[in-house]
Amino acid sequence: MKNFREVAAGKKLLKKDYVAIMMWFMGKAIQAAAAVDRAAKKEFVDMPDNFTFALSVMPNGPHMIVGKDQRGFVRYRGWDPEGKRIDLKMKIKNIEAAMLIFTFQESTALATARDRLIVDGEVAYACAVVRILDIVEVYLLPKIIAKLAVKRYPGWSFRRKYLGRVLVYVRTIFGF
Amino acid sequence: MDMPGYYEFCCRVKIISGHDAMEKIPDTLAQLNAGRPMIVTDKGVVGAGLIDIVVNAISDGVNIRAIADDVPSDSDLRIVNSLARLYREKGCDSLIAIGGGSVMDTAKGINIVVSEEADDLMKFSGANALKRALRPLIAIPTTAGTGSEVTLVAVIKDHEKHLKMAFVSNFLLPDVAVVDSRMTLTLPPAITAATGMDALSHAVEAYTCLSKNPLSDAHALAAIRLISDNLLKVMVNPGDKKGRLCMSSAATLAGIAFGNSMVGMVHTLGHSVGSVCGVPHGACMAILLPYGLEYNMHKNGHLTAELLFPLAGPEVYAGTPNEERAEKVIALIRRMNQDLYEATGGRHARFFKEVLDREGKEMVAKEKLPDIAKTALSDGSIFYNPEDLDYNDFLMVLEVAWEGTPLNPRSLSSIHSPSSIIRTT
Amino acid sequence: MRLLMYLPEHYEFFCPVKINSGNRALEQIPCELDALNARKPLVIAGKDAGERGLVDVIIDAFKDSGIAIGIFDGVPAAPDLKLIKELFNIYRDRGYDAVIAVGGGPVADTAKMLNIAVSGKPEDIEGCAGENLIKRPLRPLIIVPTLAGTGYEVSKYAFFDGRSYESHFLMPHLAVIDPRMTIPEDAVTTAATSLAALSHAVEAYTGSGKNPLADAYAYTAIQLIMEHLVNVIRNQRDRNGSLSLANAHAMAACAFSNVAPGVAHKLGKVMGDVCHLHPGLCMGMLLPHILEKQMSEGGYHIPDLLLPLAGFEAYASTAENLRARKAVDILHDLLKDLSAVSGGVIPRLWKDAQVSEDTLQDIAQKAVGVGASFDMDGCVKIVRQAREGR
């Protein structure tokens, strides 16, 4: 029929790559912060053993999976959810919403308030994960950007913020 | 008015309101292709004679197959399952929920079980687990109110496994909410006060928290106006039909507002006090509302200031300088609590120390406050609060709300980092 | 003594439309389709939407979603049943399960008729013409408005092939208001559609069917139009302003789907037909004069209108007995401002629009025939006032 055509969904490769890299970095940084920061450590202590959460972009990724093993160590468990039991899924509804979050145009709180995310699992743990993400963002980002990403920029001691930042970066980059 | 960068708004419930709105139910059910409803309610509602009124209003037009009145004050999975069995046994094709929040939640839970022929309700918990319309559900609130007749959430407790299951879906919304003045004419004073303040807290938080949008604001403003015009009136004259209808409409409007814009720290703390100490929800809301506004003042004081208009009227609004309006709103809400305290002979508590159970025992022990603060950390409504709260912040607010001493917003500056103001939209 | 808020003794209200508005709203559609249990939408648009690049924006929004979309962008200005049958065949044969309409007017009407067809069969359409003849919910329908629509596309009404349709089931499940789609085309169209929305909202707010739920939509629509219309005419690149206007159109449609259309709507439509002007411009020009007449007859709800028109401060600082007058003056001023800011292109009075005296009687006759609640003389008087400016 004239004027009719079918269009397959295109791709947004560059944006997906950007978000994938940001998520990879964030996952490793969470692992690092859990080792370095007391508050982050405490959030994880309150979670059950083998607790695993994923931050994902719908419909097909990218993903960030972080889990606590039997001994209580927090590990970045990669970008592939296949075959893993995931207790809490925080799903970002589409790649553009993920871009708004990872370019700090919408903080995690604002993104939630704007229905950009779906939480699939116990809300109590989602609250903990958001607190953990906030801590990691303060470590990773300079104050001027972190203030866009978190609701309340904390008044940490010089030692915690700067020494911690060095440790988190070193651990993130070198992967331990 | 600020247009948010992004928002969503939806209320698919048909509303029928009036002094004889229930008489429309048979036609409404017929339009939904149903006519054999099961009534879900609780013993309190039956005892107040309300079920008789409903049955008289509708039995000519529908074939009421069952009346289930054993819904407890806290929604319970076992009751949901047993009532679903009753529904099937009696060959019902629709549900009529008559009651407060727990009855509404239970009816929504039953609806999931019977529509999806589920044996495990857990499978449908969380957000967006339902994929298609459920059986027709008509909601008749008997308090004014929780607003659950227009929300898409149901919370069901599994007392055996100590789990609270939350269900969130547009398909949970009742098809019709029937707001009829006869349902609240005999509402006892303490419950009128508590549920009225519950509705007020919904409207106020919807207006002042992060998910606000222009449509939910309009609903919230109308709700606040109606409550401020009518709550004390119906305390003094409980048989005021017009006043009761206004309060019920206000509760529905507030329900639509917060159903779309969520709530904030007043509910975060209120849920926790309710869960740890068993204090009724409305009582917690009434006590915490002024504190929530004080705590958040540095972030949303300009919004709180606007509420002076619906709360106190144009003359007071015009006569109050802008810088003083937010504080005046908070003072007015405390004044309302005071008036309700007097009107209920002391049963409506103004602070947590004053909350007593039926035997006169204190319900919120000071030693429990740390537990409550800890519980609050797990409540999702905190996402929508304009300011962050950690354990110490929660504890501080609980302590002052326990004593009844106001929070001084100016003294909070050491807690709130003044340079972290973010746009609330 | 405080003026209490009005609550009618009995009212009913229903609005099944979900509204998603703002930055990247289109990208949320895949999730919304999933919530409606749909996976394969058919997008319907007019040729102009394709030319203005709006269809490309939609295609872009579906990237990374994994969803293939069908696009038909040839809806003409006067679609017919033949077109519906062809679209029905495409929908059925290719397994589509939702309709997304881009824009208003004939596109939205086509989408609504198509939706009746695909929810049953094409032969059902004619039998649904009239009031409330559709008996059950239809298949998923999403509308993406542009500023060229008055909001009518979101309402319970449709007009197709010479027949009127009215049913809440025709309202879309979702209206997606995205700033990329709401860029104004030209000053006159924008003013016309917004004035139509304004007059619908005002009539819902002050009419006899007034109720708090319809009011919430009407109130917000009026506020948004008052805040943004003149600015958008002055600067058509005001994204936030255009988005706000599009919101107002949709909200006014929700209000007016619950309260019967008033005199401004009926008279304005007739005038639009007779004078070959956009009915929205006609409604806007008539509105203040109609309210003046109602004021002189009691006009119970007109003082409250000042609230959305001017805001809390202005309302609070205006004496009670002067509020109605002020409200009507604001509406007169709006027309003046629109005329000024558009260099006279947007007409304020009939004589600017070059409407002749003879047509007045014709208009009044037709309007009374349609059921405008004023009598012949009343109509003529109003139209003359709107022509002369008092």
Image: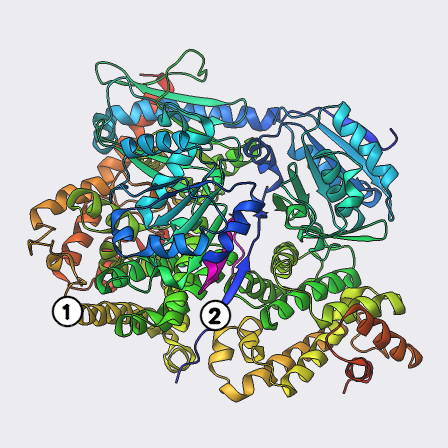
Is B17 contained in the magenta span?
Answer: yes
Q: Are marks 2 and 1 on the same chain?
A: no
- The answer, for residue A7, to whether it is visible in the render is yes
Q: How many marks?
A: 2
Q: Which residue is mark 2?
A: C7
The picture quadrant where one finds residue B375 is top left
CA neighbours of label 2 inside 10 A, class few (<14), some (14 to 19), many (20+): some
What is the chain letter for disc 1?
B
- Asked if disc 2 and disc 1 are in contact, CB closer than 8 Å, the reply is no
Above or below residue B147? Residue B70 is above
CA neighbours of label 1 inside 10 A, class few (<14), some (14 to 19), many (20+): few
What is the chain letter for disc 2?
C
Stretch in magenta: B1-21
Side of B92 where C272 appears, left or right: right
- The answer, for residue C230, to whether it is visible in the render is no
Above or below residue B286? Residue B395 is above
Q: Secondary structure at mark 1?
A: loop
Tell me the tag on residue B345: 1
Identity, as a three-letter code, of the amino acid under mark 2: Leu
* Residue at screen point 78% across, 42% down: C125
- A170 or B159, nearer to the observer: B159
Identity, as a three-letter code, of the amino acid under mark 1: Gly
